[in-house]
Amino acid sequence: MIVGMTVITVSILVTQITKNTFNKNNPNLDVVVGAKGSPLQLILSAIHHIDIPTGNISYQNALKIIKHPAIKSGIPISLGDNFQNFRIIGTNKNILKLYKANLKIGSIWEKPMQSIIGYNVANATQLKVDKFFVGSHGLIDTGDVHAEQPYKVVGILNKTGTIIDNLILTSLESVWSLHSNETNNIKNNSNLEVTALLLKYKNKSSVFSFPRLINKNTNMQAASPNFEISKLFKLTGNAHKVINYLSILIISLSFIGILFTLLNNINDRKYDLAILRTLGFTKRKVFSLILIEGMTISLLGSVIGLIIGCVMYTSMEHLSLIGRNMISIEYEFFLDLLLIWLIVIVTSFLTCLIPCIKVYNQNVRSTLLNS
Amino acid sequence: MLICKNLSFSIDGHKLFSNININVENQKDLLITGPSGIGKTTLLSILCGLQKPSGGDVLYNDINLYNLAENKIDHFRGNNLGIVFQSFNLINSFTVKQNLELANTVLNSQDNDYLYNLLHRVGLADKSHLKVSKLSVGEKQRLAVARAFIGNPKWIFCDEPTSSLDDKNTENITTFIKEESLRCKASLILITHDKRVQSILNFSQTLKLGEEL
């Protein structure tokens, strides 16, 4: 029972929180343009920040795409550094509107090397407005820091329940300035690069034509977040199904275990139960005793399994960098867990009824005589 | 008052006894005798609500026992009857004290002083913490007798209560049964072949199964 509940709890949490995260992180973006490579990798790195980017694209090309007649709005992002594993994103101020993020304190950046930090970043790093920090090269903390050019925190964002909570935002110029050795002069637009473009169409009719245009005629790729994520769910969905079937099998076996344990117990104690009846314990009372015994095993087992499952999931979440960018603040998935738990309890109840009915129909005298 | 009218019992088509009529007034006693296999223990089970008769009625102060639902029969037995079974029917994995407490639980009683008093009088006070499985047959029999008097029952049924006892213990237990029945103002219905018991209790009426009444 404990093992079954643990497996099914972890499986539900992983499935639900992953779906929840992917849905919340995408603020209705239609398409993402980035360097050629895996389209799924592009989506996971540019929107969900749980993968490395496919490469960089020219800023000049990015500007041309934003001005394309099919595009309603576009936001360039530039990745490359982190602070304590929180990604530093070079972008423009429109990203705040896109994610409906508001400042809790401070102001938006005005100059290079100024930054605003997400709600979770502020909590985890204890960074405050007017404090400085140095970015570390790469997307995970390697210790290779840009010590010569620290960032200054100028604002902290309110909680949004999206990936923005886990990001450090700054201007594109800041990122270019830090990497000026690699990209030469900031003023020379032709050498500047960004990682990806987050785009919305003017109308949905461009959903087929625009990606084809980019993929065929440029050295960039256009990927649809919805398409890629549903493809990902299709792939992982089967694995989740297998895990869920496995946990249902384990739980079913535990029901059989409870049933036979109770039946064996009753068989061993049928003489004692008959004595209870001679002393005046009613049939109903003896029925309740067996039911309470069975339900205690089920309740304890299922609750312990549920707790272990939640603890295992939380540990996984804290131990992995990917897990940290999962949004576990929302609790809709508790309904799923509650539903599974209720199904387990109701099935346990029905299973326990079998030995209870056997006891209820026990013939006291023949039991005493046969013993 | 316990009244039985035309009681009969058959098992697999074989008639064990029939046309049994009993009338035991309150605080009176009845001795049941008869050869082995005649159905004395079965009759006792019928009187205690543990075995439905094939025919006839069992009435306790105008309550027709077998007209009650099974749960009510159990409840009636717990509150009004004290039974000493021939095979004792004690829970072996429980201690002496726990066996008595269990009987107390049915009555929602917490009177532990009374339990110790009973144990003292049947000579088991110093063995109250022992598991029943550690007791001798005679000690088990004395414990079974003590348990029957918990809750001041109005009818006491004993099935060969001295079969495993020596002379001294037979005298003690028989006296104990007599005194406790008087104290509880209970009627005593007893099955025995033991002449020692019959001489001490001096029954006012006798039912000889297998013979014409």
Image (spheres, rainbow, N blue to C red):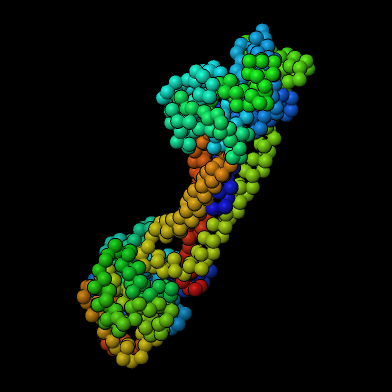
User: Residue lying farthest front?
Assistant: A148
Name the side, left or right, on which A90 lies relative to B170: right
On the question of residue B34 being in view, the answer is no
Picture coordinates of residue A362 (x, y %)?
A: 48, 62
Q: Quadrant of the C terminus of chain B?
A: bottom left
Tally of numbered tags: 0
Give the side of residue A340 with respect to residue A138, left or right.
left
Left or right: where B180 falls relative to A24: left
Q: Position of residue A231 (x, y in %)?
A: 69, 30
Quarter of the image containing the N terminus of chain B? Answer: bottom left
Q: Kindly give the residue lying farthest to the top in the view shown.
A: A69
- Residue name at image x 74 percent, y 16 percent: A214
Q: Is residue A273 above or below residue A328?
A: below
Task: Choose between A165 and A301: the one closer to the eye.
Answer: A165
| Quarter residue A47 falls in | top right
Question: Residue sitting at 43 percent across and 28 percent down?
Answer: A129
Using the rendered view, name the quadrant where residue A51 is placed: top right
Q: Position of residue A165 (x, y in %)?
A: 50, 29
Q: Residue at x 32, y 69 (%)?
A: B101
Q: Is residue B82 left or right of residue A150?
A: left
Location of residue A167 with respect to B50 vertically, above or below: above
Q: Residue at x 67, y 21 (%)?
A: A184
- The quarter of the picture where residue A282 lies is bottom left
Along the line of sight, the residue nearer the viewer: A162 or A171: A171
Percent from the top left, x then y, of residue A293? 45, 58
In depth, the one of A279 and A6 nearer the eye is A6
Q: Is residue A221 visible?
A: yes
